[in-house]
Amino acid sequence: MNISLELKLELEKRARQTKDKHEHTCLCVVLARSEGMSHELIAQAHRISVQSVYRYLAEYEAERKHNMMPEVGVKAN
């Protein structure tokens, strides 16, 4: 999963500012996956199940599509 630098910075900012633990974990999972971490390592680092990692990633993709966020893997111009 590759994300543009601009999107990465935006997600990091959202993760720092949110008070919602669920949103924070979701954003951290997405960022970790974008850095090449395995699903298993992400699960271990965040003390969640591997299944939860997959759910968080699917949730992010659904939110991105719903909100028309920039597609993961597309570099900003």
Image (spheres, rainbow, N blue to C red):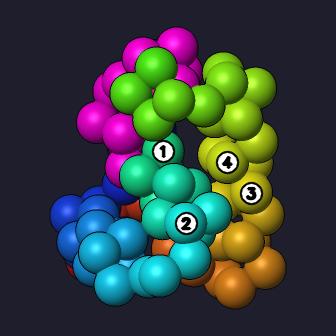
Q: CA distance from mark 3 to mark 1?
A: 11 Å
Q: Amino acid at mark 2?
A: Lys
Q: Quadrant of residue 68?
A: bottom right
Dot 4 crowding, Cα within 10 Å, few <14, some 14–19, many 20+: many
Is 19 part of what is drawn in magenta? no
The local secondary structure at tag 1 comes to helix
Q: Nearer the viewer, mark 2 or mark 1?
A: 2
* Tag 1–tag 4 contact (CB < 8 Å): yes
Among the two numbered marks 2 and 3 on one chain, the one whose residue lies closer to the N terminus: 2
The residue under label 1 is 29
Q: CA distance from mark 4 to mark 2?
A: 12 Å
Range of the magenta residues? 31-43
* Tag 2–tag 1 contact (CB < 8 Å): no
* Tag 2–tag 3 contact (CB < 8 Å): no
Q: Quadrant of residue 5?
A: bottom left
Compared with residue 63, is residue 67 higher up or lower down, i.e. above or below?
below
The local secondary structure at tag 2 comes to helix
Q: CA distance from mark 2 to mark 1?
A: 12 Å
What residue is drawn where x is 29% and y is 75%? Answer: 16
* Tag 4–tag 3 contact (CB < 8 Å): yes
The residue under label 4 is 56
The residue under label 2 is 21
Among the two numbered marks 2 and 1 on one chain, the one whose residue lies closer to the N terminus: 2
Dot 1 crowding, Cα within 10 Å, few <14, some 14–19, many 20+: many
The local secondary structure at tag 3 comes to helix
| Magenta portion: prevailing SS class | helix
Q: Residue 59's mark?
A: 3
Q: CA distance from mark 4 to mark 3?
A: 5 Å
Dot 2 crowding, Cα within 10 Å, few <14, some 14–19, many 20+: few
